[in-house]
Image (tube, rainbow, N blue to C red):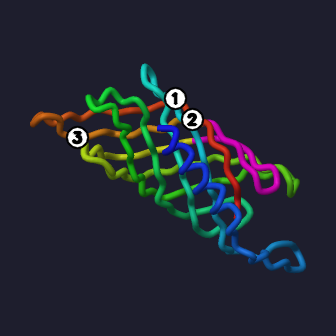
């Protein structure tokens, strides 16, 4: 378990050092839109009666104007200590659209936002856990660093010992992000 968390953190930190060197064009009245944008988010979600879910959710897309971003991403989520007989963690690969609305504050350095990531998650290990995925959050950015709190839901459809199981796993989350 510790190796998986360490690997995820190293992956995140190494990708943060590989950022686009493109600076937004500045026109007479400020940045020119639309323009490329993206984020890397690392978070933790607490599900009721379960151990936490660790989330890595990058997103790449277009900031259409100062108030709206649309993009998509492929993330990685792990559910620890799931009660599976062999003690293994469950891993999912969420594939999602990312819609983000920025609230005007009149400043360049502080920006509140609302974030939504609807999608579908594929199972990565033998349990084949898969299903609809949704993450809703509210947060703020200070320069290129963001912090958000929200709720994430993972619909689960899998088969254990010949029986099909359909349920949902949801919980409150907190994410730290870096903007490109």
Graded by Cα atoms within 10 Å as few (under 14), some (14 to 19) or many (20 or more), the crowding at tag 1 reads some
**Label 2 element class:** strand
Write the residue at 58% across / 66% down. Answer: 60
Which residue is denoted by mark 2 in the rendering?
Answer: 173
Kindly check if marks 1 and 3 are in contact, taking CB atoms under 8 A apart as contact. Answer: no
Measure the C-alpha gap from mark 3 to mark 2.
Answer: 24 Å
Q: Which of marks 1 and 2 is nearer the N terminus?
A: 1
Q: What secondary structure is the stretch in magenta mostly built from? A: strand
Q: Is residue 34 left or right of residue 5?
A: right
Residue at the farthest top position: 49
Q: Residue at x 70, y 55 (%)?
A: 178
Q: Estimate the spatial distance between the alpha carbons at disc 1 and disc 2, rounded to whole Å.
A: 6 Å
**Which residue does the image show at 63% across and 36% down from the upper left?**
149
Q: Does dot 1 land on a helix, a strand or a loop?
A: strand
In the displayed structure, 38 sits above or below 103; it is below
Q: What residue is disc 3 on?
A: 158
The magenta stretch spans residue 146 = yes
Relative to 104, say whether 163 is above or below.
above
Where residue 23 sits, quadrant-wise, is bottom right
Residue drawn at the location 45% of the way across and 56% of the way down? 96
Residue 80: where, in percent of width, then height?
Answer: 43, 34
Mark 1 highlights which residue? Answer: 46
Sooner in the amino-acid sequence: mark 1 or mark 3: 1
Which structural element holds mark 3? strand
Q: Does label 3 or label 2 sit earlier along the sequence?
A: 3
Magenta stretch, residue numbers: 137-149
- Are circles 1 and 2 on residues that touch, CB within 8 Å? yes
Horizontal and vertical percent position of residue 112: 74, 46
Q: Position of residue 140 (x, y in %)?
A: 74, 45
Q: Residue 177, image x and y in percent? A: 67, 50
């Amino acid at each position: 378990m510790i190796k998986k968390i360490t690997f995820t953190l190293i992956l995140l930190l190494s990708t943060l050092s590989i950022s686009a060197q493109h600076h937004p064009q500045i026109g007479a009245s400020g940045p020119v839109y639309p323009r490329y944008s993206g984020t890397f988010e690392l978070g933790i979600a607490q599900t009721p009666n379960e151990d936490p879910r660790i989330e890595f959710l990058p997103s790449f897309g277009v900031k259409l104007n100062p108030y709206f971003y649309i993009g998509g991403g492929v993330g990685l989520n792990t559910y620890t200590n799931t009660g599976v007989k062999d003690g293994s963690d469950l891993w999912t690969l969420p594939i999602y659209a990312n819609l983000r609305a920025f609230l005007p504050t009149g400043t360049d350095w502080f920006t509140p936002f609302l974030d939504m990531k609807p999608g579908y998650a594929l199972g990565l290990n033998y349990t084949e856990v898969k299903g609809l995925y949704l993450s809703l959050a509210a947060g703020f950015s200070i320069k290129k660093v963001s912090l958000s709190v929200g709720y994430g839901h993972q619909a689960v459809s899998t088969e254990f010992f010949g029986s099909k199981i359909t349920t949902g796993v949801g919980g409150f989350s907190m994410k730290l992000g870096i903007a490109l």
